[in-house]
Amino acid sequence: MDFLEKIKPIEKFILIDQVIAKIATLIENGDLKPGDILPGERILSERLGISRTSLRQALKALNVLGVLDIVPGRKTYIKKSFTDILVNPFRFIKAVHAIKIEEIFEARRILEEGIVEIAAKKAKGHDISELKKYIEMAENDLENKSEFMYAEFMFHQYIFEISDNKILTAVMHSVNDLLIVLEKYEKDYLTIDDRKKSFVQHVDIYNAIKDNNIQDARLAMHKHLDTMESRLSKLENS
């Protein structure tokens, strides 16, 4: 596995986006190709210099993003259909510094408020259970910034999955990837009060989806995005 030589340890405060970016770079450069099998957790975590727990979280997120195919008890593959996605989200990361926060949020608002409406309409029992898991995870990790942000990230990712619209989801991932750098910066300034407010807003979104209430779901997401945009804009101007 020649590509392993190109993986160097990364900082111990690793967030999920750093692992995603590392694997994305390997894919973009052709070191990893659709259908390739990733090495085992022990080897990969050692090469990255992170714990297996952090690695599992990153791999799970990449699975939700549609990049990896994780076969329980067997292997983890780069999805063969990955390069056929309408929009390759990783290519947009490089443009982040040339785009205004307002432009990103305009796109995110249009997309994510629409996606949450679809999710509220389509959500079934197992979808609600999965969303609740991330709500509980966030509540338990309010004191831990990195774990809390991971739970929030996965909450939004699963809403995309519930919508079951591959086109909207692919475009939404592109917009989200533009926010990765900004949200990583925001983490250092995210207070416990900020996290509590965000958690309450996620609960509102969850309850609306659980009740299949399309209007309330859109309104709850709108309020949540208002809060996020305001917070990031203040950081940008500080």
Image (cartoon, rainbow, N blue to C red):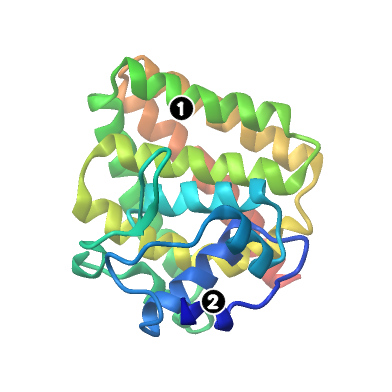
- C-alpha distance separating marks 2 and 1: 34 Å
Q: Which residue is mark 1?
A: 131
Identified at 24% across, 25% down, the residue is 121
Q: Amino acid at mark 2?
A: Leu
Horizontal and vertical percent position of residue 152: 57, 41
Identified at 38% across, 80% down, the residue is 28
Q: Nearer the viewer, residue 146 or 204?
A: 146
Horizontal and vertical percent position of residue 79: 28, 59
Q: Relative to 237, does residue 158 appear above or below in the rendering?
A: above
Q: Nearer the viewer, mark 2 or mark 1?
A: 2
Q: Relative to 137, does residue 61 appear above or below in the rendering?
A: below
Q: Nearer the viewer, residue 219 or 168?
A: 168
Q: Relative to 86, does residue 41 appear above or below in the rendering?
A: above
Q: Nearer the viewer, residue 114 or 158?
A: 158
Give the secondary structure at mark 1: helix
Q: Nearer the viewer, residue 81 or 180?
A: 81
> Left or right of 115: which side holds 179?
right
Horizontal and vertical percent position of residue 196: 71, 33
For marks 2 and 1 on the same chain, the one whose residue lies earlier in the sequence: 2
Identified at 34% across, 56% down, the residue is 172
> Left or right of 212: which side holds 181?
right
**Residue 237, quarter of the rendered image:** bottom right
Q: Which mark is residue 4?
A: 2
Q: Amino acid at mark 1?
A: Leu
Horizontal and vertical percent position of residue 159: 38, 37
The 10 Å Cα crowd at callout 2, few under 14, some 14 to 19, many 20 or more, is some
Give the secondary structure at mark 2: helix
Q: Relative to 16, does residue 147 appear above or below in the rendering?
A: above
